[in-house]
Amino acid sequence: MTRDGGWAGLLEPGEEILWQGQPTEGVDWRGLTAPLSLFGMVFTLFSLGWIWFAAALIGGSDAPGILMVFPLFGLPFLAVGLYLAVGRLWVDALRRRGTWYTLTDRQAFMAEEALGRKTLRSWPIAEMSEVELIDGVPGDVLFGSETRARPRRAPAPQRSRRRRVTGTASRIGFFRIAEARKVWRLLRAQRTAILAAARAPEPEGTT
């Protein structure tokens, strides 16, 4: 979505675009130090050990032909480990290539396009409880959080199927943008102006 026509019918009357941009491209190798990647590395090593041990065990014996495929059972686990370790970083880089950020004087938008599917989300500036800058080049501008609920089966008497809802919190914002400081200042200034206008008393004689 761009300034020239991509926003037709999406903005409110009089709404003005203050900034537009995309996350920086490329793989974020800092993710290798994340707990999920470290777990993936351990899982990968375990899978390789399984495959090597099974192959060595079968190779040194007169095992039936059907057992020759036994080491292959480790391949799915190897694939999972490689994805958690490094594959997810490549997927994230591909996802960012189809992501666009837009800041207007009223809302923050995030548009995504993946596998031919387009999604658009927005967050009103007036409802943002905080605006945080994670400085750097690129940097992040955070303005909220959300909890993604997932049902979890809870033990209950008489084998009932009641479920209780749990969830994981995630931050909301513009991630890995080159102009993080500029966007942070724009967003803070606009949020301050909106809150000040909301607190201002109405002129006398208005209804």
Image (cartoon, grey):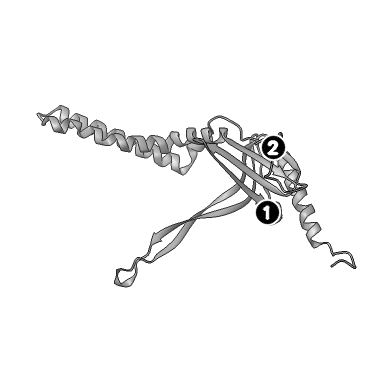
Where does residue 40 sit, x and y in percent of width and height? 40, 39
Q: Is residue 65 above or below residue 125?
A: above
**Helix or strand or loop: what does disc 1 sit on?**
loop
User: Residue 139 appears in which quarter of the rendering?
Assistant: top right
**Helix or strand or loop: what does disc 2 sit on?**
strand
Instruction: Residue type at mark 1: give it.
Output: Glu
Residue pictured at 53% horizontal, 31% vertical: 27
Instruction: Residue type at mark 2: give it.
Output: Gln
170 to the left or right of 12 = left
Where does residue 60 sit, x and y in percent of width and height? 14, 27
Disc 1 versus disc 2: nearer the observer: 2
The one of 170 and 5 positioned closer to us in this rendering? 5
51 to the left or right of 183 = left
Disc on res. 130: 1
Disc on res. 41: none
Residue pictured at 67% horizontal, 46% vertical: 108
Point out the residue furthest to the right here.
204
Point out the residue furthest to the top here.
59
114 to the left or right of 183 = left
User: Residue 104 appears in which quarter of the rendering?
Assistant: top right
Q: What separation in Å lies between label 1 and label 2 (alpha carbons)?
A: 21 Å
Residue with the mark numbered 2: 20
Q: Quadrant of the C terminus?
A: bottom right
Point out the residue furthest to the front here.
9
204 to the left or right of 118 = right
Where does residue 114 sit, x and y in percent of width and height? 52, 36
Residue pictured at 33% horizontal, 68% vertical: 160
The one of 89 and 116 positioned closer to us in this rendering? 116
